[in-house]
Amino acid sequence: MRPLWVFGYGSLVWNPGFAWTQRQVAVLKGFRRSFCMLSIHHRGTEELPGLVLALDAAEAEAECHGVAFEIAPEIADETLEYLRARELISAAYLEEWHPLTLEDGREVEAVVYVIDRAHEQYRGDLTLEDQAQRIARATGGRGPNCEYLHQTAAHLAALGLRDPELDWLSDRVKVLKGE
């Protein structure tokens, strides 16, 4: 039995919700992290959708830096069940397998959740200002949309993975909310 690898680029970075044996900073090529998925469950509602991060297919030289989690083989199936219940709640994500390059130089095959551009929740057309306005207003079953943004930006920065767009959005949302 082989371990399962899972790539986190958003809330999985700071709230994986599953047991892991090791984690490393990792790079996924050909995708970018983007607030391009409407959230009608976790960080918004159908009446006032929020936005959550997704992996959006991009040019081949694009890279998304995040965290790779190694899951023990004995709990791989239950971890996948948990992830599917969490990530595939509205079918806007596609579960795919892609190679990651770990910070120690190894390459592993990992499960990743990628936005389905054909899904009605895909909003890759929003400007950063539009994203900030929506994030500042929305709240869903897991709390305020701005909390998701601020937590993700802070945890990525703590890992040395600064994301200029997330930093700008975090600062802008604080201004919009009067913080």
Image (cartoon, rainbow, N blue to C red):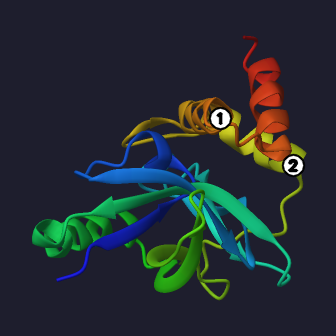
Q: Which residue is mark 2?
A: 128
* SS at mark 2 in the image: helix
Give whichever of 150, 122 is nearer the camera: 150
Q: Is residue 78 above or below residue 173?
A: below
**Amino acid type at mark 1:** Arg
Give whichever of 23, 9 is nearer the camera: 23
Q: How many marks?
A: 2
Where the C terminus falls, by quadrant? top right
Q: Residue at x 63, y 39 (%)?
A: 156
Give whichever of 118, 148 is nearer the camera: 148
Q: Residue at x 81, y 25 (%)?
A: 171
Is disc 2 in contact with disc 1, using a CB cutoff of under 8 Å?
A: no
Disc 1 residue crowd, few under 14, some 14–19, many 20+, Cα 10 Å: some
Q: Which mark is residue 19?
A: none
Q: Which residue is mark 1?
A: 137
Q: Residue at x 85, y 42 (%)?
A: 164
Which quarter of the picture shows residue 169?
Answer: top right
Give whichever of 82, 125 is nearer the camera: 82
The answer to whether residue 89 of the structure is visible from this angle is no
Question: Which residue is at the far top?
Answer: 179
The answer to whether residue 165 of the structure is visible from this angle is yes
